[in-house]
Image (cartoon, rainbow, N blue to C red):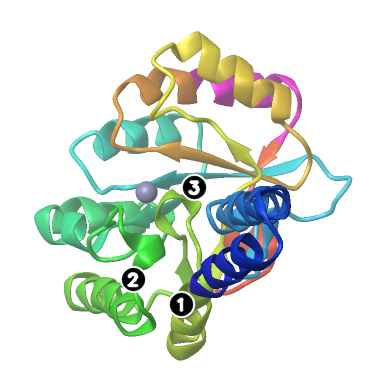
């Protein structure tokens, strides 16, 4: 960024305003390009994330982010009713607040993964040391409260940077993204969320929901009925990706 500003300044001084505008516009597009790549885990630009698998079999995985919360219990009831195993990417702080719900997720046959300790909005700006600490602190809480060593990581907001890449290398964890984002935390209409997810259903896909939002409960049940009707088999994330959830 500093180099770009220096270059733009030199162009302005030595070549004139038109050239400066060309350089400025090019720079602006470059910044937007990098921001787009870093804020979308699906592009695999800085970090290679597993976001789907190529298969012709009608298999799909369901994942939940941001719990455990009180509402997770409602999600667990629905999953049990339909005999479905899912994955929950949990926030360390939330595990500390609801350790019994965290243990219940595991005891119910679902898998759990790391979603950082504090789920800070500054994730993209953290240095490698702080990013690594966010990941290891969440792992430590999970190990202390449930005796498991998590191996899978999902970046909050899907934001990744070269520091995330280095932190994952240091911790030896695997990054898992998604291919079907429900936007359940953003879109207020259950019907609109369901419509969006249904349209994107594809073999080998990974669906992202949030177990913290009560309006997702009905959406989830409707989706499970839809998947049943379409003969989809809901496969636990680690089995779909053929990876180990724990070490
Ligand atoms: Zn999140």
Residue located farthest toward the bottom when viewing the structure as drawn: 170
Q: Is residue 170 visible?
A: yes
Residue that mark 1 sits on: 163
Q: Residue 42, image x and y in percent? A: 65, 53
Q: Residue at x 55, y 65 (%)?
A: 9
- Kindly report the distance in space between the C-alpha atoms of the residues bearing marks 2 and 1: 7 Å
In the image, residue 210 above or below residue 118? above
Relative to residue 138, is residue 236 drawn left or right? right
Marks 2 and 1 close (CB-CB < 8 Å) = yes
Residue occupying the point 53% across, 31% down:
182
In percent of width and height, residue 93 lies at: 17, 60
Residue 227 position in % (x across, y down): 66, 26
Task: Name the disc covering residue 126, or none.
Answer: 2
Identify the secondary structure beneath mark 1. Answer: helix
**Residue 94, quarter of the rendered image:** bottom left
Crowding around mark 3 (Cα neighbors within 10 Å: few <14, some 14 to 19, many 20+) is many
Task: Answer left or right for 62 relative to 246.
Answer: right
Residue receiving disc 3: 86
Q: Main secondary structure of the magenta part?
A: helix
The local secondary structure at tag 3 comes to loop
Question: Is residue 107 shown left or right of residue 53?
Answer: left
C-alpha gap between disc 3 and disc 1 = 29 Å
């Amino acid at each position: 960024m500093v180099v770009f500003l220096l270059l733009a300044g030199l162009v302005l001084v030595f070549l004139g305003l038109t050239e400066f505008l060309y350089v400025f516009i090019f720079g602006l597009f470059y910044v937007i390009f990098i921001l787009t790549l870093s804020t979308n885990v699906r592009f695999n630009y800085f970090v290679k994330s597993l976001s789907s698998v190529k298969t012709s079999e009608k298999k799909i995985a369901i994942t939940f982010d941001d719990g455990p919360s009180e509402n997770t219990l409602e999600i667990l009831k629905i999953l049990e009713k339909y005999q479905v195993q899912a994955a929950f990417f949990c926030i360390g702080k939330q595990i500390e607040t609801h350790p019994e719900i965290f243990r219940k997720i595991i005891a119910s046959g679902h898998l759990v993964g790391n979603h950082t300790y504090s789920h800070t909005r500054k994730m993209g700006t953290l240095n490698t040391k702080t990013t690594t600490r966010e990941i290891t602190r969440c792992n430590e809480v999970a190990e202390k409260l449930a005796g498991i060593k998590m191996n899978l990581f999902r970046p909050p907001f899907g934001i990744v940077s070269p520091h995330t890449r280095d932190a994952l290398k240091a911790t030896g964890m695997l990054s898992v993204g998604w291919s079907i984002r429900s936007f359940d935390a953003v879109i207020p209409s259950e019907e609109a969320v369901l419509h969006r997810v249904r349209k994107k259903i594809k073999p080998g896909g990974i669906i992202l929901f949030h177990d913290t939002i009560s309006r997702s409960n009905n959406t989830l049940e409707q989706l499970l009925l839809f998947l049943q009707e379409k003969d989809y088999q809901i496969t636990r994330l680690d089995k779909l990706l053929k990876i180990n959830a724990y070490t």
